[in-house]
Structure formats: C-alpha cells, structure tokens
Image (cartoon, grey):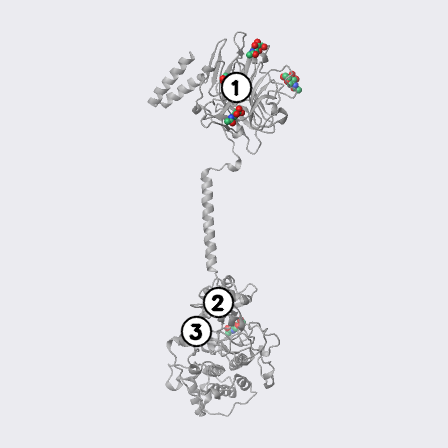
Amino acid sequence: MHRLEVREYLHIRSRLSDSSSAMARWLLQILVISSLHLISLSSQQESRFVYENFLNQEHLYLDKSAKVLPSGLLQLTKSLEHQIGHAFYKKPIELSASRPLSFSTHFVCALVPKPGVEGGHGIAFVVSPSVDFSHAESTRYLGVFNVSTSESSSFRVLAVELDTIWNPDFKDINNNHVGIDVNSPLSVGIASASYYSDIKGINESISLLSGNPIQVWVDYVGNMLNVSIAPLEVQKPSRPLLSQPINLSENFPNSSRLFVGFSAATGTAISNQYILWWSFSTSRGTLQRLDISKLPEVPHPRAPHKNFSPWIIILVVCLAAVVLAVLAGIYFRRRKKYSEVSETWEKEFDAHRFSYKSLFKATKGFSKDEFLGKGGFGEVYRGNLPQGREIAVKRVSHNGDEGVKQFVAEVVSMRCLKHRNLVPLFGYCRRKRELLLVSEYMPNGSLDEHLFDETKPVLSWPQRLVVVKGIASALWYLHTGADQVVLHRDVKASNIMLDAEFNGRLGDFGMARFHEHGGNAATTAAVGTVGYMAPELITMGASTGTDVYAFGVFMLEVTCGRRPVEPQLQVEKRHMIKWVCECWKKDSLLDATDPRLGNEYLPEEVEMVMKLGLLCSNIVPESRPTMEQVVLYLNKNLPLPDFSPYTLGIGTFAPVLVDAASLVVSSASWSWSAPSMSSSSANHSPYACQSGDQPWGQTLDTKNSLHIVPEPEKPKTLSAGVKTVTLPA
Ligand SMILES: *[C@@H]1O[C@H](CO)[C@@H](O)[C@H](O)[C@H]1NC(C)=O
Ligand SMILES: *[C@@H]1O[C@H](CO)[C@@H](O)[C@H](O)[C@H]1NC(C)=O
Ligand SMILES: *[C@@H]1O[C@H](CO)[C@@H](O)[C@H](O)[C@H]1NC(C)=O
Ligand SMILES: *[C@@H]1O[C@H](CO)[C@@H](O)[C@H](O)[C@H]1NC(C)=O
Ligand SMILES: *[C@@H]1O[C@H](CO)[C@@H](O)[C@H](O)[C@H]1NC(C)=O
C-alpha cells in the first residue's frame, strides 16, 4: 500500500511540475509528504522505516532535550551545558529463536559546536531492551551510561558512539573517534574518525565537529558488527571503519524486544547535535536510499564578529583603500610642499637652517596678507615664529646650485656681523631652485618709502640725521670691524630699513653676487644701482671706495629728498650731484634741501651733510674719505676738509654705462675681500662668530674709540685674494 502511494505521488508530482501549477503542487506536497516521511513496513519478522525528516514524529519517542525543529531536524541536544537527549523508534524489534538478529541502519548526523566553546560530547546509536535512561548521565556517559556502569553489571546496551571528547580512562584514542560500546562506556572497538576512500585507496580522516553532515552506517549480520562513516557526498565505503564480532543474542539474553534510537549529551563542552535523516531495516537489502537534496539545512551559528555580509566587508575594504589613498596623497603632497634640499656640506650650517615647514607656517603659507614687498630678487613676507619672534622671509629663486654653497656659507657668516644698524639675519632654508633668507622683521619698512611716499608723515631732519649716522657707523663696521672686509655694494635708501625707533638698519642684503654666481657673468664686476655706482666700479670692481661713493649719494638723497637721477626734471636738476654742486656754486646750497623739511633744520648740519655727500661722491676714488672719517665728520669730531665746488672731481656726474642685463641685477649686495690671507689661527672656524666684546653694537662717536677693536683674525680657509661673495637679507 505504501509503495503504491509513493509511485502515485511521484507520478502526480512530475505531471504537476510540467503543468507548473505551483499551488496545487504545494498542497499535494503537504498532504503526501506528511504521510510519506514515515514509511513503515513491519511484519512480525521484518522491521523497516525511514525518516526523511522528523516533521512527522509518529513512532518517535523523544525525551529530555530532544526535540524536532520546524525545519525537520531532530535536535538531540541544544547548545547548553549538561544536556541529554534521546530519540527512539517506539516499535521494538522482535527477537525470536528461529531467526537470528540482524539489522542495518544508515543515518545522517551533524555535530555543530557552539562558537568559541569546545564542542562535545557526541552522539551514540543505541540498541537497548528499554527506553528508560533515567539513570544515565551526561558528558562522557553520552546519556547512556553512568558512573557505576561496568561490564559486570546487569545493564545491557549496545552503543555505537561518535565521540568528540578524549577520555583516557575510557581508553579513548583521541577527541575525534568512533567506538563500539557493549554494556559499558569502555569501547570494545575504537577507531579515529575516518573513511576508506575507494577512489583514492587511502583512509581519509573526518572531523566529527566540523558541523557538516556525516553519514553513518551500522550493519550487524552474522554476529559481526560493521561501522562506517563518510561525508555526505561519498558513497558507503567498501571497507568498514570498524568490524567487531559480537553475539548480540548472547548479549541480550532475557530480551525478546530491542529498541533502536539515539542518545546524545553535552557537558561543559557543548554542541548542537542533530539527526537529519535515518533509515533502518532488519533486512539489509531493503534499506531506503539517501537523497541528499531533501536533507534539512543544518543551522550554523556564527561567531558574532564573523557575522558580516560580504558586501559590508567589500565596502569596508574599499573605504579603507580610499582613505589610504587619500592619506598617501596628502602625505606625498605635504612632502612635496615642504620638501627641501639639503646636502652633506650643509651639515655644519644646520644650526642656522630653518625648516621650510616652519617658515611656511610662520608666514601663513606665504599668504598675501603677509606680503611685504618685492625686492630685486624675490618676494618678502612677514612671519611669526612660534616663540613670538617676528621675522621677514625673503624668497629668492635661483636657477642652479652653482654658487649656492658659497652663498650659504656667507649667509651663515653674516650671522656673526652684529651691529645695531644692521638688519639681523637669523638663517636660511634651501629648496629646489629656491633659497629663503630669514631676518628680523623691521616694522617701519624701508627708508625710501618714508622719503618718497607722500602719504607718510615727513621724516624730520633729526630723524634723517640719526639714520645717516647709523648707516655710516654700520658701513664703517663692515669695512673694518668684521673678520673680513665686507662690502655692502648697494647702499641706497630702499635698502635702509627702519626699526621701531626709526633707527636706520642696513639690510635687504640683496643677491647681486649670488645672482652672478647663478650664471649672469656679464655683471661680475658691475653690481649696484645706477646713480649710486662709482665710475671706477666697471673697471676696478667693488671696493670700500665704491661703498663710500654710494653712501655719499645716499646722504644727498636723504637731504634733498630726491632720487639721484630723475629724468623727468629739467636738465640742470636732472642729476642730483651736479645740481647740488651748482647750488653750492651759486652760494645757495640750501636750495637743494628737501622742500618737505621746510625750515625745520639746522642749516649748518644740512650744509655739512650735503658737502660730505659731495666729498664722498667724488669721482676720484683717492679723494673720497674712508667710512671712519665719514663717521668722524658726521659726529663733528673732525671738521670737513677744505674743498670747494670747483675742486677736481666734485659735483661731477659720471654716468656708469651698464647694459640692460645688469640693470636688472640692481639690488643690495654684500661682498667681502680678504685683504691679507697670510694669517694663522688654525682652529678658527670661518663660520664661528668671534667671541669677546664687540663695540659695534653702538654708534661710535668719539675719535678715541676708533681703535679699540682688535684686529680680527683672518680665517684660514678662505682662499687668498679678493673673494667676493653674496649675502642675504
Ligand atoms: C547506573 O545505572 C544503572 C542501570 O540503569 C542503575 O541501576 C544504577 O543505579 C545507576 N547508578 C547511578 C549511580 O546512578
Ligand atoms: C584504514 O583504517 C582501517 C581501520 O582503522 C585500518 O584497518 C586500515 O589499515 C587503514 N588503511 C589504510 C590504507 O590506512
Ligand atoms: C563487515 O566487514 C567485513 C570486512 O571487514 C565484511 O567481510 C563483512 O561482509 C561485513 N559485514 C557486513 C554485514 O557488512
Ligand atoms: C550466540 O549466542 C547464542 C546464545 O548464547 C548461541 O546460541 C549462539 O550459538 C551464539 N552464536 C555464535 C556464532 O557464537
Ligand atoms: C613704526 O613702528 C612702530 C612699532 O611697530 C609703530 O608703533 C609706529 O607707528 C611706526 N611708525 C610708522 C610711521 O609707521
């Protein structure tokens, strides 16, 4: 009858799937499957059944934690500690003397460990005269045995265990084994969980706790008990894992009926233990075949941290990649932004080096707000260092590295020049094609702004005199007071800075010489600004005399409040020196005075400064005074020498012919020459500042103080002869 039903069902099912009547198919499935899942054929001799799932619990005896899940899974133990679960087929196998006991069973089980916990204890297929296991214990007793169970007791049972805990006192071989237990937890036959692969011809091991479904076959025929296991997709192995001779008739002497079923237990080791499918028969040939596709799904609890969908992981990886790329981009941009050039030879100047980053920050990224002005060679920015020091940063671009080393050496040496009328230089920074020079910030800008900018208040005569005296003192210091003779080479109003107290500060030490090293050979000799350049500059080169000439022009500039050459004026006024001299010749020297001064000056002082200006700008170099003498004249410590506007060389404007290229170069420049290189002092570093008192911090105004400065030692490492070098602002 049952078989007919099966055929009918299959027939109808195939027809229905053809006609795709899903609704009817579904209804029929519900109807038929529920009756089919348990197919039981039994006679007095024969017992046969299959559970394709356990939704139909007919003939099923469950106890303790055993239950059937909605998916059709038979759950023997859930993932709690010290659980026991039993599931038995309610109808016992009848034994008779005429027919010796034999049976075959095939089932699929799954042992799914709880995440993060050791899995255990295992499942046993049990043959027992009773379904009463009230005395049984959990853990290693698998819900079948208890502490006092031993072979000698009257307790009769056969158990085939899939054991996932290693109990050495039960002679277990490992924590992943299959055993045959007869009346005692001590296995009579035991083997590590594996199967004989007919294809490969070797034993393949299986992890019972993998959580994957495992097939188990138990066959008892002719007093021989064979046990095999295999993964789901593998056929029954041709060689059993265990083959144990047992006389079950002898083992169950007083029993006429035997129950078959399962037992499982947990301890502190925990697994979800399931039976998915079970087929049993007392005659081997009629065992139902397993259809893997109909097996219920085994739930796999996952560790919480693994509970990400692949999309989230991909998203996170992509985000991380993007963030990394952005960070790398920022890093490389910053590196490029703040990159500097540093060479080994610069090591000794490290102390004077600023990092580009610090200058970048100090000037707020060289922002327009901090822009002070554009000099001949670069832009100047105001900045604030973290210590609160105000600085001016000049950015000088250059084409090559040629001359840079020398230049840097000079920059550093400049630090040794200390005079209150010099703009202090703090250090430098070097980048590719760019040099940055850091000096003190002068709050009141350059002198020429105050002289020529109509919007600014007029500089009074005393203020102008103070500036002139200060610059004279600074030049005198440069010419005689430093280690080497230092030439400024571009004295003019726009290179004189004014500090907070309106003291003149010689500064904006331009790049003329540096530029020259950078490749413009045409300007080698003639560097300066037209109008301030002594006529011999072209032929003889720079000297203290050319500085004195420029200073003379500068004095006239300050007094007359005009530039040395003003082509827009009428011919007689066009050249300042000539014009001043003409005024003197007409005995009206004061006519040349800056009209903005009005009458607010001492005529003798103005006249003296103008005459001194003419004296200094004498075209005959030998007729010019030294800076030392200029300081003495200005401070009235020495009367001006006797000369008139008709004296040779006075009031003669000798235009210096320079080509257009060198006009561009006009800016301040330093240079020094080492007049006598013969000297000694081996240990003296050319870059170390001279220690000891330096009286140059103040304006010297008495004749007596002129010689208190000891003759400085000449550094040995500087090459002999006149050495011209460039220095910064
Ligand atoms: C062990 O099981 C046997 C048989 O079921 C029972 O007689 C005995 O009392 C049990 N021992 C303990 C300690 O529970
Ligand atoms: C496979 O396992 C069985 C049972 O444990 C053993 O008897 C047999 O020798 C093994 N065969 C191989 C090839 O390892
Ligand atoms: C049990 O295994 C042995 C070989 O180990 C085999 O000869 C015997 O036929 C098997 N018995 C059953 C019932 O499968
Ligand atoms: C098994 O045990 C029964 C009862 O003790 C006995 O009659 C039978 O001969 C035994 N079979 C074998 C093969 O030893
Ligand atoms: C000169 O600088 C000082 C200090 O910063 C300032 O107080 C003063 O106003 C400035 N004078 C002029 C004319 O800019």
Dot 1 crowding, Cα within 10 Å, few <14, some 14–19, many 20+? some
Residue 471 position (above or below residue 48) = below
Asked if the residue at tag 2 contacts the one at tag 3, i.e. Cβ–Cβ closer than 8 Å, the answer is no
- Name the residue nearer the viewer: 108 or 580: 108
Mark in front: 3 vs 2: 3
- Label at residue 393: none
The amino acid type, in three-letter code, at marker 1 is Asn
- Distance of label 3 from label 1 (alpha carbons): 103 Å
Residue 45 screen position, x and y as percent: 50, 9
- Left or right of 172: which side holds 35? left
- The answer to whether residue 424 is seen in the rendering is no
If you read the primary sequence from the N terminus, does the residue marked by circle 3 or circle 2 appear first? 2
Label 1 residue near ligand 3, CB within 8 Å: yes
The amino acid type, in three-letter code, at marker 2 is Leu
Asked if the residue at tag 1 contacts the one at tag 3, i.e. Cβ–Cβ closer than 8 Å, the answer is no
- The answer to whether residue 409 is seen in the rendering is yes
Residue 684 screen position, x and y as percent: 58, 73
Q: Is mark 1 on a helix, strand or loop?
A: strand
Q: Mark 3 points at which residue?
A: 516
Dot 3 crowding, Cα within 10 Å, few <14, some 14–19, many 20+? many
Residue 193 screen position, x and y as percent: 53, 26
Q: Which residue lies furthest to the top in this view?
A: 98
The amino acid type, in three-letter code, at marker 3 is Glu
- Label at residue 226: 1
Q: What element carries label 2?
A: strand
Residue 687 screen position, x and y as percent: 55, 72
- Distance of label 1 from label 2 (alpha carbons): 92 Å
Q: Name the residue under label 2.
A: 436
